Amino acid sequence: MSKPTFAYLLLKEHPYGREMLKQLISEGFIPAIIITEDSKIADEEREKFLKRIEGNPIAPEVRKQLEELSKEGVNVKNIEVSIHNSEQVMPHIKEIDLDLIVFGGTRIIRGEILDYPKHGVINSHPGLLPECRGSASPAWSVYHDIPIGSSTHFCDNGVDTGHLLLKRKVPVKRGMNYEDLCYETLVLAGILMKEALIAYEEGRWNEMRHPQGESEHPTFRNAPDEILEKVYQILSDETYAHYVD
């Protein structure tokens, strides 16, 4: 198979989406269109993630990455919408023969968008699936002694419940703090998405795709301050159960 024609959706200048786009471009996977959500939610999520990875390097802004592509003669349309829903997104993609849609850090998206591309919508989640679904996966992983990692999966109408393509653990070493763990899962999520598109190009998805199975944990919500305090303490005391050293 050839490289996929795909749309790339992300919250405006989200560090998660910036890293993933950098990873994809590094292997020649260029979106047919980027659809950016510019909203209050996008601002809140961007600032939240910037805080989570504080002290670690951040990939260039999307606009700067697109400027570099433009210098090479590659121009990618970057559309802004106020929310990633079918009403606002579909008019921009319905005339494009999309193989895939790639989520690079978005809110929960359901509906017609998920059914449009020929070969599905895929997302990378900064947690192992099905063990750690939902928000703030590194925090809940430490709190519940779940191994830390990232996963690439198909999107359905559930929350992080679609079929898996790839998952991989982050090697957690003593001395790593919460911000380091959030950063490592963010980077790994981008790497796994890149590897997933390489596998698509090589025609290997059918052999890789499989159901997640069930999780013994609920779908997690954003970790409140009292949970984060406990997480910081666990990491400070080095009592997390899955250190590699």
Image: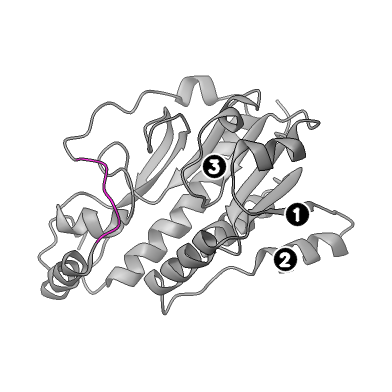
- Determine crowd level at label 2: few under 14, some 14-19, many 20+ residues with C-alpha closer than 10 A: few
Q: Is residue 38 left or right of residue 171?
A: right
Q: Which residue is depicted at the point 32% across and 44% down?
A: 128
Q: Which residue is depicted at the point 33% across and 64% down?
A: 181
Q: CA distance from mark 1 to mark 2?
A: 9 Å
Q: CA distance from mark 3 to mark 2?
A: 24 Å
- Determine crowd level at label 3: few under 14, some 14-19, many 20+ residues with C-alpha closer than 10 A: some
Picture coordinates of residue 89, whole percent (x, y): 67, 41
Give the residue type at disc 2: Arg
Please, what secondary structure does the residue beneath circle 1 have?
strand
Quadrant of the snapshot with the N terminus: top right
Given contact means CB atoms under 8 Å apart, are the residues at marks 3 and 1 in contact? no
Instruction: State whether residue 113 is above or below residue 68.
Output: above
Please, what secondary structure does the residue beneath circle 3 have?
helix
> Label 1: which residue?
78
> Label 3: which residue?
195
Given contact means CB atoms under 8 Å apart, are the residues at marks 1 and 2 in contact? yes
Q: Is residue 234 left or right of residue 167?
A: left
Region rendered in magenta: 218-223
> Label 2: which residue?
63
Q: CA distance from mark 3 to mark 1?
A: 24 Å
Give the residue type at disc 3: Glu
Q: Which residue is depicted at the point 54% across and 42% down?
A: 195
Q: Nearer the viewer, mark 3 or mark 1?
A: 1
Q: Which residue is depicted at the point 41% across and 77% down?
A: 54
Residue 93 in view in this figure: yes
Q: Nearer the viewer, residue 1 or 117?
A: 117
Given the current orientation, which residue lies at the most extreme top position? 206
Q: Earlier in the sequence, mark 3 or mark 2?
A: 2
